[in-house]
Image (cartoon, grey):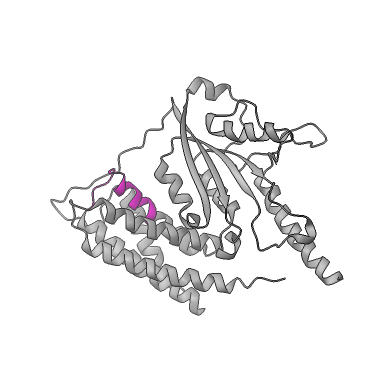
Amino acid sequence: MSIDINQFLDTFYEESFEGLDTMETELLALTPGEADEESINTIFRAAHSIKGGSGTFGLTVVSDFTHVLETLLDEMRDGRREVTQPAVDLMLASVDVLRDMLSALRDGNEIDAPRVADVHGQLEALLKGAEAGAGEGETVLEAAPVEQEQAGSSRWTIEFKPFSHLFKSGNDPVRIMMELADLGTVRASVNLDALPELDLLDPEECYLSWFIEVEGDISEEQLKDVFAWVEDDCELSFERGQIEASAAADQDVAATEDVPPTRQGNEEGEAKPPSPAAPPANQAAAAKKAQGGESGSIRVGIDKVDALINMVGELVITQSMLN
């Protein structure tokens, strides 16, 4: 059984061009110094979608360029950077560059690398505080430094239950976990209760769900951005708690900056169950496990889950060939 990735890529290009049109319309409507918060959020979401999609399809030249633009927009919507006319003009130029880049990639043509590098450099300069095209008498604004919250960091508990058709939409839970790891420390446990016997398994269907903990100085909006591409293809819930700095220092950390947690166990590699000190959001899940007698989930590394999914797909294909 084979999946034609081009059908997803064509959809990505179509949605990206629509997103660029939206960005252009909203940017042209902005009034410097009086920018509407919803307009900035709309522009940000479009840029975020293009960055996420291009990363999924390996279009790194697009995702790297969009990342800088996304960071600039993130500072504006958080109120850390004022919306100025030079900034708006540069973002409009960035939209034109992105449109040309995507058109070239779609049509198999060469990208105008010097132009991309020039605008990319202007965006980075703007992020460092130098306003693009600022003339005499204009105020040059620098982004306020972001103070990392050392005490009382957030612990987010996420219940992520993809619908069975998730893979057919071109989305991959592994990439979502990787984006979460960019925000903070990630712990994840996968639920295998819905996984059928091998002869009944369809490799294009998603049977897994996850309980995820993310610790760090993270807002709900940041988490929603990570799941923006799959919000209509899953059941999703967020619950926020607080952890004290001293408690965080004493915890046995299951995963650090690398996503996600490595398997914990004895020398033979036997997996250990999650720590019994579960946060309140996981108490319902823990009670359900207790009633069922045996746990329906184990803690494993995402790299192992990814490899398992690939192996299962290969086994199904091989079984079909043998039959």
> Picture quarter containing residue 39?
bottom left
Spot occupied by residue 133 in the image (x, y as percentages of width and height): 23, 59
| Drawn side of residue 65 relative to residue 201, left or right | left
Give the residues drawn in magenta, as a range. Answer: 69-83
Spot occupied by residue 255 in the image (x, y as percentages of width and height): 61, 36
Q: Which of 147 and 253 is in front in this view?
A: 253
Tell me the residue at 72%/71% (across/down).
Answer: 1
Spot occupied by residue 53 in the image (x, y as percentages of width and height): 50, 62
Outermost residue on the right side: it is 322
**Quadrant holding the C terminus:** bottom right
Tell me the residue at 53%/33% (across/down).
Answer: 281
Q: Nearer the viewer, residue 101 or 40?
A: 40
Query: How many numbered callouts?
Result: 0
For residue 254, say whether it is visible.
no
Please check the rendered image and state whether residue 72 is part of the magenta-colored stretch, yes or no: yes
Q: Nearer the viewer, residue 17 or 168?
A: 168
Please check the rendered image and state whether residue 143 is part of the magenta-colored stretch, yes or no: no
Helix, strand or loop for the magenta stretch, by majority: helix
Spot occupied by residue 319 in the image (x, y as percentages of width and height): 83, 66
From what the image shows, is residue 188 above or below residue 16? above
For residue 70, say whether it is visible.
yes
Outermost residue on the left side: it is 137
Tell me the residue at 67%/48% (across/down).
Answer: 303
Tell me the residue at 14%/53% (across/down).
Answer: 136
